[in-house]
Amino acid sequence: MFAAFWAISGLFQVIVWGALVTPLIVPFVVIPRGRRERYAIWGARVFGWLCTYVTCMGRTTVIGLENLPKKRGYLVISNHRSWEDVGLLIYYTASQGISKKEVAYIPFFGFTGWVSGVIFFDRSKKDSRQRVVTEAVSMMKQGANLHVFPEGTRTRTGLLADKVYLRLVAACWEAGIDVVPAAVWNTENAVRAEGAHALPFQRFGLQISPPLDRAAFPDADAYAVATWGRVIAMARAHGSDRPFSAVDDLDHHAAARLALTEQPPA
């Protein structure tokens, strides 16, 4: 009962945070898309912080922030376990996401997301997916940071998906854009993937890896597979490829070091 109440109140809070953040980013609407995001993302980061530390009251472990590129205009890719993944990535990686079109209609949330860089698309239309790749590359070349979940949706079992979508990662190799591998763990403890179920004060975390050297790979597909391989290595090290019911008390700093020693496929 409490978990359902907390989930419903959390949704209400997300709308409230969107209403509070909107005035911070509305002035940037007049700047063309692709350039305004470097300014509007600061309002979005306030939103991400509110979701993580006020709505979820999270107790977080974040490893590898120093690995984020100094130059703006990069893509972050991550495994996906919970809605809270979005708040973590927005706040800590200064990036906005690529989201299904239905999210655009959430009051305030959709508008503030669009102004600060979210790309909305129709999953059912192939041409919409291609438009996302073209628009995302254009925006990142102009200095916007984006994040994407190659699994396409939140895991319902706790296991990593067998099928992933790496077209945008390959396009980044071709365009000379850095791709940052990241992994989240235990975010489902704060907000479950399915149903109205959320709990405060949960421990969860994020690890960020340095981008792989594009010159070390012969083509875009090899680079995309290797970059996702780094995400897999980090996720597994942190226990994020096990059924939700399998919970271990891991030393996540040790797991982070272990994950980075595994060489991705060339």
Image: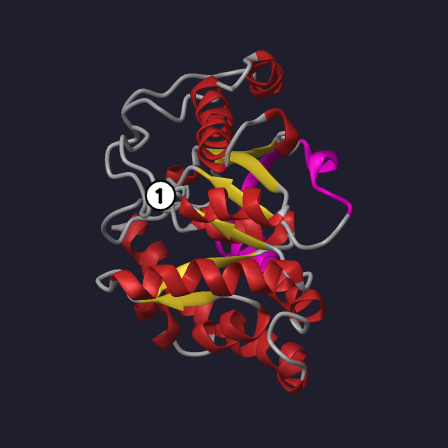
What is the quadrant of residue 214 in the picture? top right
Up-down relation of residue 246 to residue 28 (above or below): above
Residue placed furthest toward the front: 218
- Tell whether 77 sits left or right of 165: right
Measured as percent of width and height from the top left, residue 249 is found at 47, 17
User: What residue is rendered at 65% in x and 54% in y?
Assistant: 94
On screen, residue 266 above or below 66: above
Residue 52 seen:
no
Q: Position of residue 230 (x, y in %)?
A: 51, 25
Q: Which residues are magenta?
A: 48-70
> Residue 195: horizontal and vertical position, in percent?
23, 51
* Residue 57 percent location from the top left of the image: 53, 48
Amino acid type at image mark 1: Tyr
Extreme right residue here?
Answer: 70
Q: Which residue is mark 1?
A: 165
Q: Residue at x 54, y 28 (%)?
A: 218
Secondary element at tag 1: loop
Q: Which residue is located at x 62 percent, y 83 percent?
A: 29
